[in-house]
Image (cartoon, helix red, strand yellow):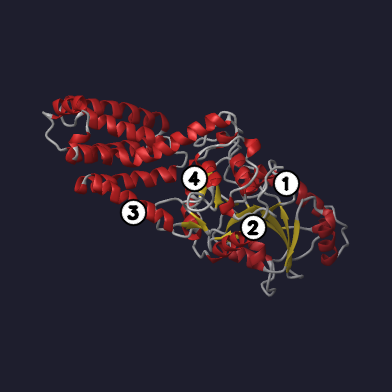
Amino acid sequence: MSDFHESYPFSAASLRERFADCADFTLRPVWPGRREVEGVALCWLDGLVSSKAVAEDVLCPLSSLAPDAPAEKCMEALLRGAVWACSVKKRGNIDETVSDLLHGSCAVVFDTAGSALTFEVKSTDSRSISSPEAEKTIKGAKDAFVETLRTNSSLVRRRLRTPALKLRQTVVGRRSGTDVAVLWLDGIANKHTLSAVMKRLDAIDVDGLTAAGNLEQYITDRPASLFPQLLHTERPDKFAAELLEGRIGILADGLPLGFLLPAPLPVFLHVADDRAQHWAMSSLLLVLRWLSTLLSLLLPALFAAVAMYHQEMIPTRILLSMIEAKQLVPFSAAVEILAMLLSFELLMEAGTRLPDPVGDTVSIIGGLIVGQSAVEAKVVSPIAVIVVAATAICGFTQPSRDLGAALRILRFVMVLLAVALGLYGVMLGMAGLIWYLCTLESYGVPYTAPMAEGGAGEVLRALLRVPLPMDKFRERALRTGDRRRQK
């Protein structure tokens, strides 16, 4: 059989030229109805499609067509179900055909017609659904998002079995062509927020979307801010619950997590177990998280300020104990605290980058050995080790790693202010931080909501967990279409 004609604007030859030097591109001439027909070819990208599906669902039916049918009749038969693929699309444009091939389809190209039929035969080789690793729960579901967009959307669909769950899909990345899906509940989510999200997604003009930051930093109101403005979760049940609250979700192909917005500060302190436990226990744990947030930020700074400028505030017995432990230590309290905080950050980074068994050993053994050795060598005082250790424990209670990272950076700033101005510096830093938080917004929702707006009931709901039968309304700050969640 002669080679494919170069004269047609859209042909198998043009596809082969587009995928030149691509070893995974496969193109083979085919004979519909087992008769010699010039200019018909089947092509696909190896690894993106299932070889068994191509052979059984496409090649076998294609060879079983009527032997005397012309090319136009063959195309019509393939469109009407002669091929056993679940999805078929007629393409008259090479760019559309290339896009289908890159998304796991095979294409039957008819040179004489200048068009192609693409059939979805995606490979099912992907990571199976596993348990959440970062957001563990006792009473919650045991499945987590994976790197496949359609699998993730199906996990949400299984929890929200309603046609009101809408999904709009777009492509981000000029070279990566990453599929991004926006999910919301029609009638609940704010339409202005939805249009703003879609507008910002469509405005992203980057080469590729390969990490969460490639998406997050282009759709937030203040990308330079330390504080997170999108809520990340690897749990489909939490993702679905937040959609019911009126938030808008984003899923991206290749990322095993979901994004939720708007995301004010209180939402970063909530966990999936809050609604699974008794309201009194959930309220207690929520208060502890708020308290640990303040201690994680302020405890080292308060110690430095009191030890350097306000010793009269320390009880006499504790002060005498501190003086006795401090006599042979050559460094000031400020140097001790900063050095210990820096050592803690180094241990955290080492434990994160090393393999799991080695990383856990380095974090635990390293912390014990370094802290004990430093105290015995009279390099730091025991009280400084206790303060930094308590600060680290409070930081580990943060459900959001992004919020925890922001607190870790601000911790150093607060210590430096305490060293310079004592408690006045701490008060100045807190005043500046509160002012800054009040200037932040997440898609029109104040970052400090509902403390910045709303009544006492809204504030109590952010700080405590009320019994679920009494929690009848959605958050006022989200401005949802339907505020009532139950009768």
Q: Can you say whether 481 is above or below 324 in the image? A: below
Q: From the top left corner, tell me how far across and down residue 466 is, in percent.
A: 58, 36
* Residue with the mark numbered 3: 432
Quadrant location of the C terminus? top right
Of callouts 3 and 1, which one flags the residue occurring earlier in the amino acid sequence? 1
Marks 2/3: CA distance? 40 Å
Which circle, 2 or 3, is nearer the viewer?
A: 3
Label of residue 169 in the image:
2
Label of residue 266 in the image:
4
Marks 4/1: CA distance? 49 Å
* Residue with the mark numbered 1: 53
The image quarter containing residue 239 is: top right
Marks 2/4: CA distance? 29 Å
Of callouts 2 and 3, which one flags the residue occurring earlier in the amino acid sequence? 2
Residue that appears at 58% across and 42% down: 146
| Three-letter code, disc 2 | Gln
Residue that appears at 22% across and 41% down: 305
